[in-house]
Image (cartoon, helix red, strand yellow):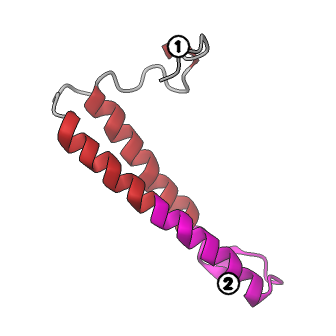
Amino acid sequence: MSDSPNNTSANRPDASGPKTLAGFLASALEMEEKLSNSVYRDYLDPANWPDDLKPDVFQKITKHLSVLIQDTKKHKKILSALTRQYGNDRKPR
């Protein structure tokens, strides 16, 4: 975390969020999952794009989105490993 004066619990998006390391890691993992499933995967479906989008443009877009999905998978693996290593505090989130 940053030492910035803006990095206080009152300035974080959800100050009532997790209070334990396991909770923070679980929240981060959940965010990655939501991002991957709700955003990137939806955009891989051509039905979610304008009808006049050219197939070659859609193919280029999905190529880039596929990279983001793979990055998200890597992030989830990292967060899962961190949870296994450090997230054994078993306190409620």
From the image, tell me which residue sits under label 2.
59
Q: Amino acid at mark 1?
A: Thr
From the image, tell me which residue sits under label 1.
8
Labels 2 and 1: the sequence-earlier one: 1
| Residue 14 on image: x %, y % | 50, 25
Element at badge 1?
Answer: loop
| Residue 34 on image: x %, y % | 46, 53
Residue 88 vertical position relative to residue 39 in the rendered view, above or below: above
| Residue 82 on image: x %, y % | 27, 42
Quarter of the figure with residue 7: top right
> Residue at the location (60% across, 78% down)?
45
How many numbered circles are shown? 2
Q: CA distance from mark 2 to mark 1?
A: 43 Å
Graded by Cα atoms within 10 Å as few (under 14), some (14 to 19) or many (20 or more), the crowding at tag 1 reads few
Q: Is residue 35 left or right of residue 75?
A: right
Q: Amino acid at mark 2?
A: Gln
The main secondary structure of the magenta stretch is: helix
Graded by Cα atoms within 10 Å as few (under 14), some (14 to 19) or many (20 or more), the crowding at tag 2 reads few
Which region shows up in magenta?
42-71
Residue 70 colored in magenta in the image: yes
Closer to the camera, 8 or 41?
Answer: 8
| Residue 22 on image: x %, y % | 26, 33
Residue 55 colored in magenta in the image: yes
> Residue at the location (24% across, 41% down)?
83
Q: Residue furthest top?
A: 5
Residue 34 vertical position relative to residue 87 in the rendered view, above or below: below
Q: Is residue 2 left or right of residue 55?
A: left
